[in-house]
Image (tube, rainbow, N blue to C red):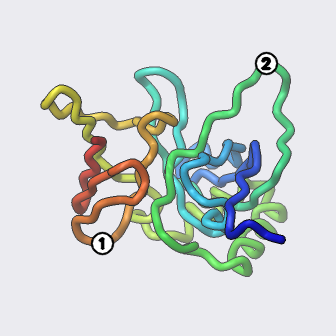
Amino acid sequence: MPLGPYCVTLPHMYATVALLTPPYASLTYLLPSEFPADFWQPGLRVAVPLGRGERAALRAAVLLRLSPTADIPKGVDCKELGWPLENAPLLSLGLLELAEDLARRQGLYPGHILGHVLPQGLRLARARLRSIKAGQATACSACATASSRSLILHQTKAAVHPCKGMRKRVGVIALL
């Protein structure tokens, strides 16, 4: 007899994403556990961390596919995906397949094709993050770590995010 509705989170789910700006690579990221597994769908635009330390940046990418496994060499840690930039996939599966097919034929990455097809505003991950600690706000341009990621970028007016009390205003996300 079932005990009621429950949510099962897989230990690790990986996402292959296509960067929409140079180097246009297809990279593998670990999916964050703060979002339900069925939220992540191919065609969704996401913000991903690229680089290390103070030179790290957030880049816009399109989620190409999900997988429970990834070919990651031993000793290499897989970074976690930042957060979604929309609530629903921007691109259809047919358009993703077309971009991947064209990329194979031209010897390019799918991100190169998608980066030249999408308008400039959709190729960028523009978000200003402000961390409020001890009453002072500090700006952060690459704040996509697991401790600060319990946020989602909505295209709506001021709202309280259900995950860990995040409060967002258009264009500015406050980490409480």
* Quarter containing the C terminus: top left
SS at circle 1:
loop
Label 1 neighbourhood size at 10 Å, few (<14), some (14-19), many (20+)? few
Separation (CA) of disc 2 from disc 1? 41 Å
Left or right: residue 81 compared with residue 100: left
Q: Nearer the viewer, residue 99 or 49?
A: 49
- Disc with the residue nearer the chain's start (2 vs 1): 2
The quarter of the image holding the N terminus is bottom right
- Which amino acid, mark 2? Gly
In the picture, residue 55 is in which quadrant?
top left
Q: Position of residue 48 (x, y in %)?
A: 54, 45
In the rendering, at what x and y percent does residue 134 appear? 17, 26
Q: Amino acid at mark 1?
A: Thr
Direction from residue 173 to residue 49 in the image, left or right: right
Taking the spot 65% from the left edge, 48% from the top edge, the residue there is 31
Which is nearer the eye, 159 or 67? 159
| Residue at 54% from the left image edge and 50% from the top image edge | 34
| 97 shown above or below 64 | below
Q: Residue 75 bears which disc, if any? A: 2
Q: Are marks 2 and 1 in contact (CB under 8 Å)?
A: no
- How dense is the environment of label 2, judged by Cα within 10 Å: few (below 14), some, or many (20 and up)? few
Give the residue pinned by disc 1. 156
In the image, farthest residue toward the front: 1
Q: Position of residue 12 (x, y in %)?
A: 75, 43
**Image position of 88 (left or right of 165):** right
Q: Which picture quadrant has residue 63?
A: bottom right
